[in-house]
Amino acid sequence: MSNQLENTVQHHVAHHFDTAEQEFTTAKLGMWIFLVQELLFFGALFVAFFVFKYLYPQMYIEAHHHLSWKMGALNTVFLITSSFTMVMGVRSAQTNQRRATMNYLFATMMLAFCFLVVKYFEYAEKFHHGFLPPHFFSGEGVHQSLPIFFGLYFVMTGLHGIHVLIGIGLIAWLMYRSSKGEFNSEFYTPVEMVGLYWHFVDLVWIFLFPLFYLVG
Amino acid sequence: MEKHSESHSHHVIVPVKSYVATFCALLVLTFITVLVSRFDFGSLNLTIALVVAFCKASLVVWIFMGLKWDRGFNLVAFVGSILFLIIFIGLTFSDIAFRHYRDSVEGEQFGLSRPVKAITSGHHEQSH
């Protein structure tokens, strides 16, 4: 254990906080407020999804058959597993296991890449068949309103994909700081915050997957 | 929230088995939701999918995001946002779901005074 902690960097509590505890809880509250805002932001898109589902029930049934539930299920497993490795990474930071923190963060990052690779193949197939948002739609379908579904599909999974990309960047940043020995049981605030963000990304997918891929 | 916590005493180290159990539960629930979707239960399919999704989301928020051990204020912020989302959905559907009582239903256009149409060709109505 001791040799793992050779080059640790001491974190200094910012001058406007009384204690490290106060700094930590303040950062965490800020992160939750941000995530709550994200939830409402995705919530608006889910409302749009349900409105059009209500207006065009038959079209949704046709549309969801154009999505591969196997790909969606695979990506769900990737994201759930990455949430688990992330939470273990945070725990490793809390317990001063720097090597384990790095490994878990790396695993999380790799799973995020796997998610995006699967997403790439899905998008490529949609492009190939012309199942695109209204202005670009050239696919063949029974229902005239079919492009609405793919507009929602690309906006919602696309925004989620951007969140995954940002998450990969944040995890890379954590790994860089962790390699410099900045995180330990006394200070692991950034790991905890990125962890919360990453679980939120998982949370959004937990709803996207059944609504788009499973239920018509 | 009255008790004043000492520095560092607040951080809870969650046992690994809690995380492993949550992870397994999430995988099992994913399997269930996929399995159920392979059968046609009519409108029950959506209900089951949403119930399972809410269970999974609760597990992630409660255990992985640690709201179970967190300060109550973060929970208030989170539950507050869910309440506002419910208001959003409720008010929207109090409009959308009752339009057909006023307007006639024609074809696929479900009685909106200004029907929602797919813009496939890309050109718009010219108003000048």
Image (cartoon, coloured by chain):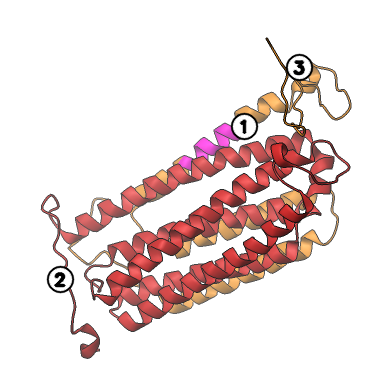
Q: At label 3, which amino acid type do we have?
A: Ser
Q: Residues within 10 Å of mark 1 (few under 14, many from 20)?
A: few
- Structural distance between the alpha carbons of marks 1 and 2: 50 Å
Residue at coordinates 73% horizontally, 49% vertically from top-left?
B47
* Rendered view: B95 above or below A171: above
- Structural distance between the alpha carbons of marks 3 and 2: 65 Å
- Mainly helix, strand or loop, the magenta region? helix
Which sits in the foreground, B13 or A175? A175
* Rendered view: B101 above or below A65: above
Query: In the rendered image, is residue B43 in sight?
Result: no
The percent coordinates of residue A140 (x first, y second) are: 85, 46
The percent coordinates of residue A169 (x first, y second) are: 41, 62
Q: Chain of mark 3?
A: B
> Which residue bears the numbered disc 2?
A10
Q: Is residue B82 magenta?
A: yes
The magenta segment is B81-90
The reply to whether the C-beta atoms of the residues labelled 3 and 1 are less than 8 Å apart is no
| Chain that appears red | A
The percent coordinates of residue A138 (x first, y second) are: 79, 44
Q: Chain of mark 2?
A: A
Q: Is residue A170 magenta?
A: no
Q: At label 2, which amino acid type do we have?
A: Gln
Is A181 placed left or right of B32 in the picture?
A: left
Q: Considering only order in the chain, which callout, 1 or 3, is on the residue closer to the N terminus?
A: 1
> Which residue bears the numbered disc 3?
B113
**Where is the C terminus of chain B found, in terms of image quarters?**
top right
Which sits in the foreground, B115 or A141? A141
> Which residue bears the numbered disc 1?
B90
Residue at coordinates 38% horizontally, 50% vertically from top-left?
A32
| Chain that appears orange | B
- Structural distance between the alpha carbons of marks 3 and 1: 21 Å
